[in-house]
Amino acid sequence: MTTIAAALAGIRADIASNVAAAGRGEDAVTLVAVSKTKPVEAVRGAIAAGQRVFGENRVQEAIAKFEPLRAEGTEIELHLIGPLQTNKVAEAVRSFEVIETLDRPRLAEAVARELAKGQGRLRHVLIEINTGEEEQKAGVLPGDADFFIRDCIDRLRLPVLGLMCIPPQGEEPALHFALLRETARRNGLRILSMGMSADYPIAIRQGATHIRLGTAIFGARPA
Ligand SMILES: *Cc1c(COP(=O)(O)O)cnc(C)c1O
């Protein structure tokens, strides 16, 4: 077994035991393999081990890495997990099945306009919530979340299915995951993308439906 295949096998077993311990259904949690900065060979290793859902934080890097794999006929579900500039919206809608980082009206309007053209891979979007209210971090502030979610769904008719967050470094993540879960529940949204390599067991206990793991699968990234 390759290193990546072994890591994936270990993670899948660990996810299954955490899901069971939380009393949740077997398929309750989807693993998003975060391959940012990693070469296409690493992605191929994960695909060979059965992984099909991937996360990338840059539009160009994702296209360069994944379009050749798609051209070979491999079925991939690609998630954008990094900040999106409005001038990259057309490419993002064309190339990603899911955008997890919708976080401002201008961007939401641009995505809605692009989706209205009826082309591209995009199936749904998640709204990123800045649960820690960190100045340097992207995401909608918790106090603005309900209004922004309603605006995206009711006015822009965007397919918003859930929420995403990245808790602040060094804080208890469970509180942030609980805030995300509560915001989603209040707004009738079913997808919760939360939990990374360091905290995914906690996220699974708090109701995560998608966990985004990079380091645990592919090893450390250059600083
Ligand atoms: C890089 C990244 C991850 C993966 O982080 P790891 O700690 O390597 O698992 C998850 N989510 C987002 C938004 C990221 O940018």
Image (cartoon, helix red, strand yellow):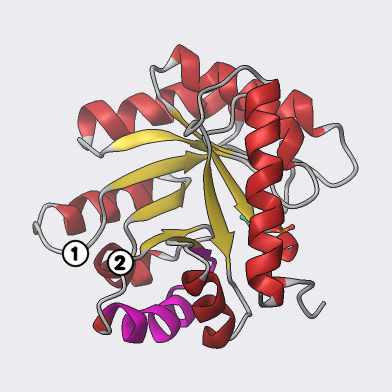
Left or right: 188 with respect to 16? left
The image quarter containing residue 45 is: bottom right
Q: Position of residue 61 (x, y in %)?
A: 48, 81
Q: Quadrant of the N terminus?
A: bottom right
Q: Main secondary structure of the magenta part?
A: helix
Q: Earlier in the sequence, mark 2 or mark 1?
A: 2
Q: Is residue 57 above or below residue 195?
A: below
Residue range in magenta is 55-70
Mark 2 is surrounded, within 10 Å at the Cα level, by few (under 14), some (14 to 19) or many (20 or more) other residues, namely few
Q: Position of residue 37 (x, y in %)?
A: 63, 79
The image quarter containing residue 223 is: bottom right
Task: Identify the residue position indicated by label 1 in the image.
Answer: 120
Q: Is residue 213 above or below residue 49?
A: above
Q: Residue at x 78, y 42 (%)?
A: 199
| Amino acid at dot 2 | Glu
Distance from Cα at disc 2 to Cα at disc 1: 15 Å
In what element is the residue under mark 2? loop
Mark 1 is surrounded, within 10 Å at the Cα level, by few (under 14), some (14 to 19) or many (20 or more) other residues, namely some
